[in-house]
């Protein structure tokens, strides 16, 4: 499980990088109603989705589910935030084209972090399956 521990640590680092970038750009803390972060971990980047409520891939989808903020963290040459959006508003645009289709063709691990006070705590991990999203 050391690989899972390493992924969880990198996921936590990516969350903090996105949070710091959000604060730097907006001058505000993350919205208080964000209670989960879904981290999709690939070989070259992490795609993060900050949500209110449960998306539905680990637990039943919340009736009041809302995607609030998305963030892409490239892993090479060093971890860095490349794209940050709040709803439809682009806060930081990537200089590099992000190809979600290619990203999701590889094996992706999905990590769930839940808010615990001011921090997000690792809760669970699974191999991402588009079938769980399509079933919603």
Image (tube, rainbow, N blue to C red):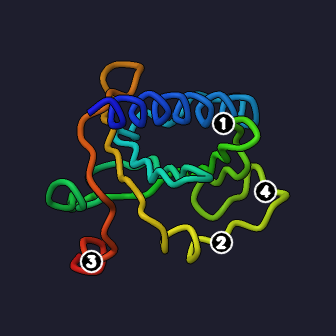
Q: Circle 1 sits on which residue?
A: 22
Looking at the image, is mark 3 or mark 4 nearer the viewer? 3
Q: Nearer the viewer, residue 65 or 47?
A: 47
Q: How far apart, in angstroms, are the residues tagged by discs 1 and 2?
A: 22 Å
Q: Circle 2 sits on which residue?
A: 99
Relative to 40, say whether 131 is above or below. below
Q: Is residue 29 left or right of residue 21?
A: left
Q: Determine whether the residue tagged by mark 1 lies in a helix, strand or loop.
A: helix
Tag shown at residue 64: none
Q: Nearer the viewer, residue 130 or 135?
A: 130
Tag shown at residue 131: 3
Looking at the image, is mark 4 or mark 2 nearer the viewer? 2
- Tell me where residue 134 sits by quadrant: bottom left
Q: How far apart, in angstroms, are the residues tagged by discs 3 and 2?
A: 20 Å
Q: Position of residue 13 (x, y in %)?
A: 53, 28
Q: Circle 4 sits on which residue?
A: 94
Q: Is residue 118 left or right of residue 31?
A: left
Q: Which residue is drawn at 24% across and 35% down?
A: 123
Is the residue under label 2 in contact with that under label 3 (CB below 8 Å)?
no
Q: Residue at x 73, y 35 (%)?
A: 78
Q: Residue at x 51, y 54 (%)?
A: 42
First along the sequence among labels 3 and 1: 1
- Tell me where residue 26 sits by quadrant: top right
Relative to 135, say whether 128 is above or below. above
Neighbourhood count class around disc 2 (C-alpha, 10 Å): few under 14, some 14–19, many 20 upward = few
Q: How far apart, in angstroms, are the residues tagged by discs 4 and 2?
A: 11 Å
Q: Determine whether the residue tagged by mark 3 lies in a helix, strand or loop.
A: helix
């Amino acid at each position: 499980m050391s690989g899972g521990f390493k992924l969880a640590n990198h996921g936590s680092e990516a969350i903090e990088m996105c949070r710091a970038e959000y604060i730097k750009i907006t001058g505000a803390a993350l919205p208080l109603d964000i209670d989960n972060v879904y981290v999709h971990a690939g070989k070259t980047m992490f795609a993060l989705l900050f949500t209110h409520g449960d998306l539905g891939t680990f637990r039943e989808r919340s009736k009041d589910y809302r995607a609030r903020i998305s963030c892409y963290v490239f892993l090479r040459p060093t971890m860095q935030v490349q794209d940050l959006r709040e709803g439809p508003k682009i806060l930081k645009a990537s200089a590099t084209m992000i190809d979600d289709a290619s990203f999701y063709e590889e094996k992706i691990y999905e990590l769930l972090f839940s808010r615990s006070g001011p921090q997000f705590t690792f809760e669970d991990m699974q191999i991402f399956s588009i079938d769980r999203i399509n079933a919603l």
